[in-house]
Amino acid sequence: MPFADAKQRFSTRVADYVRYRPGYPPALIDLLRDECGLTERSIIADIGSGTGKLAELFLKNDNQVFGVEPNAEMRGGGEEVLRAWSNFTSVNGSAEATTLADASVDFVTVGQAFHWFEPQAARKEFARILQPNGYVALIWNDRRMEESPFARDYENLLQKFGNDYASVKDSYPEADKIGTFFGADAFQSRDLPNHQDFDWEALAGRLRSSSYAPLPADAKYTPMMTALENIFRANEHVGVVRMNYFTRIYYGHLREHGN
């Protein structure tokens, strides 16, 4: 479900996004190496690259990475975080219009952003920029919402205070929609474990980084943060709470529909 403000939603949240959003497990590189033939020579187009959370993993693998990001503030955050990497190129583009050359990359990767795209326009663009038999990997860090009292309390808080949380949550595609994007039987999926440990300040920043979290000018902001602190105090152990994720990866080739 595309959102009219998808390319601007995170403009005011860059600092919190950089500091408090989760990265991606190194086992993702191993998976793509074993399943998709990723090597250090593979060229990556990381679409919706934001502040560089996913791009950094491939840069550490010595890949050349083009980070394509339409939001100027997020793109600037990524440029700052990744400024030391000579194999990173920041691109002012979008999933639907990357500006990259035809057949110029071996992998298209998307971390935590695919649900913001226009899927058919993005599919056409990915097919254009990929080398023949290139791979697409769609990746999300999904919270494990029912595993612990903290996880359940945090989910309930989002449902109560999030401005359009239900719509964003519902926009995450299920396997049947992923199949429509890739083409029948053209993809596989894997889950990898991931987590973050937060003190109070970091947990507050993690919440503020979410596009649906009320901002300080919103009347819901103060009661939301009070409720979050109560959740933290009720669940912390030696000053820390753990947020567990599964990193879900859908990967495969783009096949012609019906083939």
Image: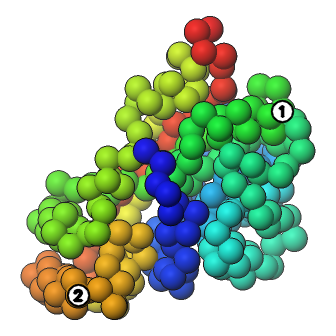
Instruction: Return the x and y of residue 27 as percentages of the image width and height.
Output: 55, 50
Q: Could one spot residue 27 in this view of the protein?
A: no
Residue lying at 55% horizontally and 69% vertically, measured from the top left: 8
Left or right of 208? Residue 240 is: left
Name the kind of residue labelled 1 in the image.
Gln
Q: Residue furthest top?
A: 259
Residue lying at 48% horizontally and 31% vertically, measured from the top left: 178
Residue nearest the observer in this picture, 106 or 12: 12
Q: Residue furthest front?
A: 4
Looking at the picture, does residue 111 appear above or below residue 122? below
Instruction: Return the x and y of residue 221 as percentages of the image width and height.
Output: 26, 86
Label 2 or label 1, whichever lies nearer to me, is 2
Instruction: Return the x and y of residue 203 as percentages of the image width and height.
Output: 32, 81
Coloration of the structure image: rainbow
Residue lying at 77% horizontally and 51% vertically, measured from the top left: 98
Looking at the picture, does residue 122 appear above or below residue 59? above
Residue nearest the observer in this picture, 229 or 118: 118
On-image quarter of the N terminus: top left
Residue lying at 52% horizontally and 37% vertically, measured from the top left: 250
- For numbered disc 1, what is the local secondary structure? strand
Q: Which mark is residue 131?
A: 1
* Residue identifier under label 2: 219
In the rendered structure, which disc, 2 or 1, sits on the residue that comes first in sequence? 1
